[in-house]
């Protein structure tokens, strides 16, 4: 039984083309920060005062919004101040080095360095928005259509971790097959666990069908959402639990693979009390 309980998952879909005319990075991030603050508050407002005090980190992950930072258009410290102005429990650390798998490496860091007492709560958010409207992010031969959005996950850590989290990097030339093989080996020792996989086009789904034939998997939602980067497994769990409400505890393996070969696999538990929030599609107005 996993010691990682999902208290809430929220997903805010974003339009593929956010702006009619691309604004400054400052304006873009002010708008994104507002959406993230609203999403975070929608989750934390349901917690008691004592539970809110147990939240001691909030990581923000991304595959694609690093470019404004690397070009010097805007700084993370400025974005962090946008997020934290008069608001509690907002993102305080940005990580994108592991692309789609960054959420898992954030969780690993927290478990290794920040966890002092249990139970403790941890927030992880994922933003992928095509702020510069780059063609590369709209469609790519590796994953075909892209999907964009903001995801926030509230996790409760209740006990010492054993093998609930895997964070690795592929060592072979075929990262996709290696990723699936590691999942198959890991899932074989876990009864009653359902896989929540990244959303990929048909030819990759067929490979997963062969390599993961004996594992229970949630449906691939690529046709509906496109590839939503690190948000995929969390959106998969959210969609499933909204369609089939949870009546008793259920365990999943949330699995993400990055183009650079990093991958994260987390065994998590959802309960009848877990919040699932799917928001309306947003574009800049």
Image (cartoon, rainbow, N blue to C red):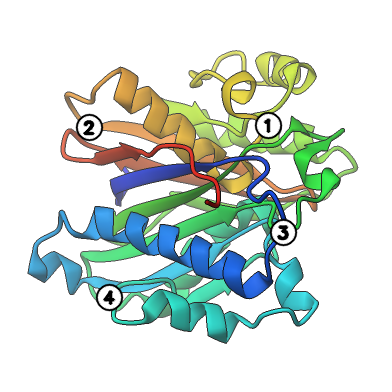
Q: Mark 3 and 4 residues: CB-CB less than 8 Å, in contact?
A: no
Residue at 9 percent across and 70 percent down: it is: 50
- Disc count in the image? 4
> Nearer the viewer's eye, disc 4 or disc 1?
4
The residue tagged 1 is 180
From this view, report whether residue 268 is shown above or below residue 201: below
Pointer 3 or 4: first along the chain? 3
- Kind of element beneath mark 1: helix
Q: Separation of disc 3 and disc 4 at Cα?
A: 30 Å
- Kind of element beneath mark 3: loop
Q: Can residue 158 be spotted in the picture? A: no
Label of residue 88 in the image? 4
Q: Can residue 142 be spotted in the picture? A: yes
Residue at 40 percent across and 27 percent down: it is: 239
Would you identify the image quadrant in which residue 105 lies?
A: bottom right
- Give left or right: position of 17 versus 230: right
> Nearer the viewer's eye, disc 2 or disc 3?
3
Q: Position of residue 245 (x, y in %)?
A: 24, 22
Pointer 4 or 1: first along the chain? 4
> Nearer the viewer's eye, disc 3 or disc 4?
3
- Give left or right: position of 61 versus 74: left
Q: Separation of disc 1 and disc 2 at Cα?
A: 25 Å
């Amino acid at each position: 039984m996993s010691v990682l309980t999902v208290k809430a998952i929220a997903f805010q879909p974003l339009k593929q083309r956010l702006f009619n005319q691309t604004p400054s990075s400052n304006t873009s991030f002010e708008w994104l920060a507002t959406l993230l603050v609203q999403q975070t508050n929608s989750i934390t407002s349901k917690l008691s005062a004592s539970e809110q005090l147990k939240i001691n980190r909030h990581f923000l992950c991304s595959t694609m919004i690093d470019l404004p930072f690397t070009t010097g258009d805007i700084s993370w410290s400025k974005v962090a101040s946008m997020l934290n102005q008069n608001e509690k429990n907002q993102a305080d650390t940005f990580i994108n080095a592991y692309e789609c798998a960054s959420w898992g490496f954030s969780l690993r860091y927290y478990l290794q360095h920040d966890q002092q007492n249990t139970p403790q709560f941890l927030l992880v958010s994922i933003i992928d928005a095509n702020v510069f409207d780059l063609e590369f992010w709209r469609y790519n031969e590796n994953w075909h259509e892209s999907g964009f959005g903001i995801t926030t996950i509230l996790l409760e850590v209740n006990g010492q971790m054993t093998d609930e989290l895997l964070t690795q990097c592929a060592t072979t030339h075929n990262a996709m097959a290696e990723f699936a093989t590691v999942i198959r080996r890991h899932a074989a020792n876990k009864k009653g666990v359902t896989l929540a996989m990244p959303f990929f086009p048909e030819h990759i789904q067929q490979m997963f069908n062969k390599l993961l034939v004996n594992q229970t998997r949630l449906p691939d939602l690529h046709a509906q959402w496109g590839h939503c980067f690190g948000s995929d497994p969390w959106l998969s769990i959210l969609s499933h639990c909204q369609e089939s409400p949870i009546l008793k505890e259920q365990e999943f393996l949330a699995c993400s693979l990055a183009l650079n070969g990093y991958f994260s696999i987390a065994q998590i538990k959802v309960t009848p009390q877990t919040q699932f929030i799917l928001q309306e599609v947003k574009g800049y107005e």
